[in-house]
Image (cartoon, rainbow, N blue to C red):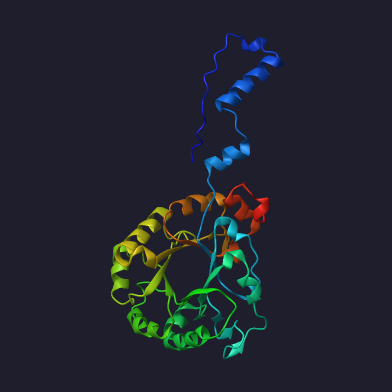
């Protein structure tokens, strides 16, 4: 981003080589009155406005059972939990089947400012192929999970079976989703890069009209640039309505040698700026967005008051 600096035209007949300290001080006062002088921290803040998102995603696993963060500094007030049961292991008390060795502290999470509202993920699988092969069983497992009481401020439900046009049998998911409560959301991506229009038409051919879409932007895995992801979101919103379309912004990047690393603030800021006007959720908070990165994204104002 370009930094905009005010330029003052301070006239002086003095020879610079003969300036003394008093004259230099006088020039600084004049410059300050003209608005030329600016605190470096303020200049940085104005140059790069604070990042704002609607929510944070949490891919619950044994390493992130106790999510801690200051994500509210980014404006996050909603938590999207990817799942509450995965590969047959349940993280909700009272669920059927095999219970996890430890549960998250759901009461504490419900009191967090970044979890004022929660979209509860249901039953899923780490392996996408296995999930698609067992979709009916996952729906039934999810139906039972959704009936369990929790202290969370539930704002909706998420069926954690990611869909894209490479799934030739996806249409059978449509009627099965009727068994799950509303508001209901699924996530969509485009691994084959068929394009926004083709993806939108494919979804419209089978997705129930009361199911919302979280579109995975693909920026973290370098599938596309953020401006292309924005085009996908615009096309989906034009077909399904903007209230049904939200964006999952990938807050990671490939790590040299394999795996993934957290994206830097310099990488995330322009990515998120492109999505202005859409509801954006960062994937994911516990794994990739520590306090220092959040503070850098949020900007310097009121850092101490917001967990900085």
**263 or 84: nearer the viewer:** 84
Instruction: Tell me if residue 232 comes above or below residue 168 in the rendering.
Output: above
* 239 or 85, nearer to the observer: 239
> Image quarter for residue 79?
bottom right
Give how far across and how far down residue 138 sits, in percent. 47, 85
- The single residue placed furthest to the bottom in the displayed view is 97
Residue 141, percent from left and from top: 49, 87
Report whether residue 191 is seen: no
The residue at the far right in this view is 21
- In this rendering, the count of numbered labels is 0
Q: Is residue 266 visible?
A: yes
Nearer to the camera, 89 or 128 = 89
In the rendered view, does 141 fall on the left or right side of 211? Answer: right
Q: Residue at x 60, y 26 (%)?
A: 32
Q: Quadrant of residue 166?
A: bottom left
Q: Residue at x 58, y 84 (%)?
A: 90
Q: Position of residue 173 (x, y in %)?
A: 37, 82
Above or below, comparing residue 297 to residue 94 in the picture: above
Q: In the rendered view, would you say 239 is above or below 97? A: above
Please tell me which residue is depicted at 65% across the width and 50% down the height of the picture: 303
> What residue sits 30% from the left and 62% below the top?
238
**Foreground: 193 or 266?**
266
Residue 146 horizontal/vertical position (percent): 50, 83
- 246 sits to left or right of 31: left
């Amino acid at each position: 981003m370009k930094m905009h600096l005010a330029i003052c035209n301070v006239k002086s007949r003095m020879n610079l080589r003969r300036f003394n300290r008093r004259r230099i001080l006088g020039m600084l006062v004049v410059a300050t009155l003209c608005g030329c002088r600016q605190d470096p921290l303020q200049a940085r803040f104005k140059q790069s406005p604070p990042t704002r998102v609607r929510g944070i995603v949490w891919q619950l696993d044994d390493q992130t059972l106790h999510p801690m963060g200051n994500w509210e500094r980014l404006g996050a007030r909603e938590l999207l939990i990817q799942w509450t049961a995965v590969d047959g292991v349940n993280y909700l008390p009272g669920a059927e089947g095999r219970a996890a060795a430890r549960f998250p502290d759901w009461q504490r999470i419900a009191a967090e400012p970044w979890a004022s509202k929660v979209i509860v993920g249901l039953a899923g699988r780490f392996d996408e192929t296995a999930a698609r092969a067992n979709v009916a069983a996952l729906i039934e497992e999810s139906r039972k999970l959704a009936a369990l009481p929790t202290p969370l401020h539930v704002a909706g439900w998420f069926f954690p079976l990611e869909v894209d046009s490479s799934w030739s049998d996806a249409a059978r998911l449509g009627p099965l989703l009727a068994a799950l409560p509303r508001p209901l959301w699924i996530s969509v991506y485009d691994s084959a890069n068929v394009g926004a229009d083709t993806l939108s038409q494919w979804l419209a051919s089978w997705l129930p009209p009361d199911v919302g879409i979280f579109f995975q932007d693909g920026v973290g895995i370098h599938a596309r640039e953020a401006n292309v992801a924005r085009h996908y979101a615009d096309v989906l919103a034009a077909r399904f309505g903007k209230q049904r379309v939200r964006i999952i912004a990938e807050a990671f990047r490939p790590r040299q040698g394999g795996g993934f690393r957290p994206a830097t603030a310099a990488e995330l800021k322009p990515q998120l700026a492109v999505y202005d006007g859409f509801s954006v959720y960062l994937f994911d908070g516990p794994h990739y967005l520590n306090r220092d990165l959040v503070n850098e994204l949020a900007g310097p104002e009121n850092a101490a008051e917001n967990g900085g």
